[in-house]
Image (tube, helix red, strand yellow):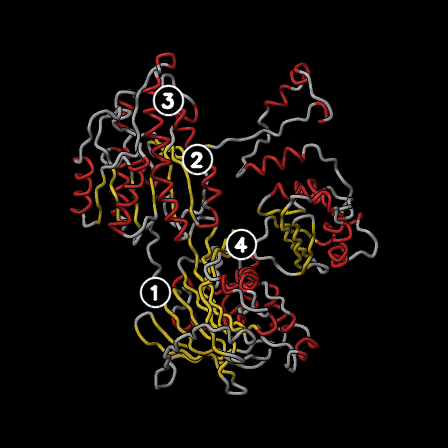
Amino acid sequence: MALNLDAIGKKIGPISKDYTWKDAVLYALGVGAGFSDLEYCYEKDLKVIPSFAITTLYDVMPEAMGLTNVNLAGILHGEQELIFHNPIPPEGTMTSEGRILNYYDKGEQKGALVVAEAETRHSNGQKLFTSNMTIFSRLDGGFGGENRPREKFEFPDRDPDFMVDMSPSEDQPLIYRLSGDTFQLHVDPEFAKMAGFEKPIMHGLCTHGYACRALIQSLIPGEPEKARRMNCRFSRPLYPGMSLQVQIWKTGEGQAVWRIQNMETQEIAIDNGLFEYGDVPKDEVRFDNKVAVVTGAGAGLGRVYALELAKRGAKVVVNDLGGARDGSGEGSSSPADQVVEEIKAAGGEAVANYDNVATVEGGEGIVKSALDAFGTIDILINNAGILRDKSFVKMDPENWHAVLDVHLNGAYNVTRPAFAVMKEQGYGRILMTTSAAGLYGNFGQTNYTAAKMALVGLMNTLKLEGQKYDIHVNTIAPVAASRLTEDVLPPDFFEKLKPEFVAPLALYLCSEKCADTGNVYNAGMGFYNRAAIVTGPGVVVGEGKEIPSPEALAENWEKVKSLKGAKTYFQLNEQIGDLMAAFSQPAGDAAAAEPAGLSVAEVFKNMPNNFISEEAQGVEVVFQYTITGSDGGDWYCDIKDGTCTIASGKHEKPICSLEMEDQDFLALMSGKLPAMQAYTSGKLKIGGDLMKSQLIEKLFKM
């Protein structure tokens, strides 16, 4: 099979890895730590070795290899770079997202290089590290691509400043593999001999961990948090028990080069090593090289947003029509111009825009200003608004539409062209502005509250459409002093509601540090909390077999309206899944239901025979199965025009992905475990189009 040249730019992940201090300690033991560096091995005041970052690759790499379609028989880990942004906490969840960067062709019979990157964040919101990996694929050269330019690398012509001798034990791979790399080459003597080795070899990334320990010990003893970058090329394999030496040369302030020598063969096992170190950078929310658009930024909240974004490095488009509070009047350039001057006087970059968000042309003009001035748009804060309060009976169509045109249609008009730019570049942060009045209601503001609640619905779909392009969309409900609220709120209360109290939340939601999307937050006076639509557990009335009477609902009303055990949903499919699960009957233990002698491979082999073609007319879907366990593997099922094709491996564009343990899968396919119960119990994990998974029981005989 040839390399998939269309994979360049394709997204990897998100892939999450839960870990505890025990995982960090197990890794440390796997790379030779012990009583000599107890801070890596004892949960009291535990420090995590920075190269623990490598353990995320054991999930990232398989997905990258699947996207690129490399010949797995000929791959080697060629080069690895880690850029450390923040110390890794002792426990939590690490979530990695990346992409395929490039291919390089070394020529026929010489192999190819596959380059990918991944960025990993912690569940606390911090960006932890960036991993750049190069895979050498010995069997994929000659596809007609460019070769990578050679980079000159030289070691100083003098003895190393540090030489750290280390001796991995004969059993080292048995410990290290428990951190995630369970490839047979490192444990199975017969497999190793088939691969051309005398016995199982050391994991290259285990040796890499030894190097990280030696670099910290020599250059920043006791301060692993000061590691900033570690780069190297893997040259030769090592057998367990062989003595190695980490050789380190200081080349400048906070810089060193290094390599690892096999002291028994004198060969270089890891070469071209770079290491950078220094004080931990201040953990700031920054927007350097980011372009932000703020609508309604001539005063109040918008002005504060624009000033704070610029102060933290953003280039800002300050949009304001300059009209009256109710949207009347011809408008004025003065408010936007004054804010731009404030930003420039403080040393920032900004341009003014006077377009009206209430028109399609105005929205496009605002985004065009960003593109003309700065080349792109990374952040959009939809802040523009007007008020025309009337009780509902007195709310004439003109006042109704005027408010919706600015708040709701205005957000649409600006977000649509901005979203297109963000989608193309694979990054964006969008902030909608709702209101507590919209979330909870306020007398005399039906136009305003309707528009503000509609923005939450707009966010709910944009969060889904932007997910694969790293576009995060959140909504803020500010309570702040502005010209819209100066005669609505009591004077003494108004004085306490400085917009500066709201800005920190808005800036965080628009930053790279914030991993959340699709949430609503209240903010005011320094108090912040999340608001959400929650759904109660509910009750089935009539068992779904007959239409219940109003009287039957009345009898069950307390259960219908109860919010005890309520939950939030990220998307419609999750709620539909729970709806359908309400009618599923409990099944027995899945493992006990396994048909005797049946294997997972046999199930997929027999799938076409159990396919009900007449039920598949007009159906077009690709199911990707990932079956874990000793009997597992990857298969996909391609259904189109009444036909069913089964193949092993991973499909490039599955519509619905299903992940299960092998025993549960066998129970599902034998009809002993209902698909919906498998899903709600967590035995079946579904990605992509959840509703398509319901076709399984319809299209196949169980």
Residue at the location (26% across, 24% down)?
Answer: 326
Indicate the quadrant where residue 615 lies. top right
Q: Which residue is mark 1?
A: 278
- How far is disc 1 from disc 2 in space, using C-alphas? 44 Å
Amino acid beneath label 4: Ile
Q: Which residue is mark 4?
A: 15
Question: Which is in the foreground here, disc 4 or disc 1?
Answer: 4
Q: Is residue 463 left or right of residue 394?
A: right
> Which of these two is toward me, 475 or 11?
11
- How far is disc 3 from disc 2 in space, using C-alphas? 17 Å
Query: Local crowd at mark 3 within 10 Å, few (<14), some, or many (≥20)?
Result: many
The residue positioned farthest toward the bottom in the image shown: 265
Q: Is residue 284 left or right of residue 563?
A: left
Mark 4 or mark 1, which has the lower sequence index?
4
Question: Which is in the foreground here, disc 1 or disc 2?
Answer: 2
Q: Which mark is residue 458?
A: 2
Amino acid beneath label 1: Gly
Mark 4 or mark 3, which has the lower sequence index?
4
Q: Is residue 122 above or below residue 249?
A: above
Residue at the location (35% across, 83% down)?
Answer: 156
**Number of marks in the image?**
4
Q: Is residue 28 left or right of residue 611?
A: left
Q: Residue 327 appears at what percent x and percent y?
A: 26, 26
Amino acid beneath label 2: Leu
Amino acid beneath label 3: Asn
Q: Residue 348 appears at what percent x and percent y?
A: 21, 49
Whether label 1 touches label 2, CB < 8 Å: no
